[in-house]
Image (tube, rainbow, N blue to C red):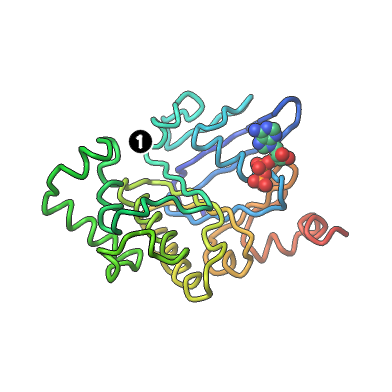
């Protein structure tokens, strides 16, 4: 990990909800081009962590920097998204009545509003970008299909494609392979490994087989704190992690 520059630095983050501590003194550093998995039992603080990074939740204390200069704690959700942090929630949200191509087209011109976007003519370069993205996410044969007719897994791929149209530096993904077939899960692993060459990824995931295939490093959260960090093998050998997962 020393070969990576640091893209995201969280230091001493505290978040409380009505006195309940959702995150306590959390520090986490993510490298450029790193693929990090965040694991931990329900209620560990994984969603709250993502919310802090995207500006949805303000930390009560601590600092959150993107790159060297962008202070996430002082930016709005919109500013953070525009600065290059894209988030995908567990449930896919695509425009079901529009085709795969049109969904990607909208995502590419997201700032302009739906109708203006669909009326504006595409430049050759924009069209090429959409076509490349369809290939990246494996939907080139479904270009003109309404998104509503895609399988659950394909909708997830489309939404990842929509995120990529914004060219984010950091992608945050919440349980991306939940509900996917084995073949789709395998494709997702390949897709993420490929994306990690150009983007950094942070993936909240419960599927340990998937984590093992994709993760450079794993951060284990428990009761709002970082319990362990390292390769999956390292954290799985950690006594405290075993205790939390097996309840010994
Ligand atoms: P995870 O994603 O790991 O399951 P969360 O970040 O969703 O964990 O939640 C961490 C803890 O914070 C949980 O106990 C949850 O009930 C609590 N929590 C999260 N968001 C809120 C909120 N808006 N108000 C009150 N409590 C919350």
Quadrant occupied by the C terminus: bottom right
Q: Where is residue 148 shown, x and y percent of the image? A: 39, 59
Q: Which residue is mark 1?
A: 82
Q: Which element is circle 1 on?
A: helix
Residue 193 visible in this rendered orientation of the protein: yes
Q: Residue at x 52, y 67 (%)?
A: 180
Q: Residue at x 42, y 41 (%)?
A: 85
Q: Is residue 49 above or below residue 236?
A: above
Asked whether, in this view, residue 172 is left or right of residue 126, the answer is right
Asked whether, in this view, residue 26 is left or right of residue 75, the answer is right
Outermost residue, front direction? Answer: 97
Q: Residues within 10 Å of mark 1 (few under 14, many from 20)?
A: some
Asked whether, in this view, residue 108 is left or right of residue 153, the answer is left
Q: Residue at x 47, y 71 (%)?
A: 184
**Disc 1 Cβ-to-ligand 1 distance below 8 Å:** no
Residue 224 visible in this rendered orientation of the protein: no
Q: Is residue 183 above or below residue 68?
A: below
Q: Where is residue 212 shown, x and y percent of the image? A: 59, 68
Q: Where is residue 13 shown, x and y percent of the image? A: 63, 32
């Amino acid at each position: 990990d020393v070969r990576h520059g640091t893209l995201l630095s969280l230091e001493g983050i505290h978040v409380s909800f009505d006195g309940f501590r959702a995150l306590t003194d959390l520090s986490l550093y993510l490298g450029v081009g790193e693929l990090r998995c965040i694991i931990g039992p329900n209620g560990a603080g994984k969603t709250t962590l993502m919310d802090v990074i995207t500006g949805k939740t303000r930390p009560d204390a601590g600092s959150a920097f993107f790159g060297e200069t962008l202070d996430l704690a002082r930016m709005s959700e919109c500013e953070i998204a525009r600065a290059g942090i894209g988030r995908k929630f567990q449930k896919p949200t695509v425009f079901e009545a529009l085709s795969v191509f049109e969904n990607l087209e909208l995502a590419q011109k997201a700032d302009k509003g739906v109708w203006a976007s669909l009326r504006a003519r595409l430049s050759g370069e924009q069209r090429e970008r959409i076509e490349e993205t369809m290939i990246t996410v494996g939907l080139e044969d479904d270009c003109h299909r309404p998104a509503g007719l895609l399988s659950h897994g394909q909708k997830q791929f489309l939404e990842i494609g929509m995120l990529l149209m914004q060219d984010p530096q950091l992608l945050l993904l919440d349980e991306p392979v939940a509900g996917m077939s084995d073949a789709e899960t395998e494709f997702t692993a390949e897709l993420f490994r490929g994306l990690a060459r150009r983007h950094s990824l942070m993936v909240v995931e419960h599927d340990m087989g998937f984590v093992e295939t994709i993760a450079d490093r794993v951060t284990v959260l428990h009761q709002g704190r970082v319990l362990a960090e390292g390769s999956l093998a390292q954290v799985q050998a950690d006594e405290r992690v075993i205790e939390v997962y097996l309840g010994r």
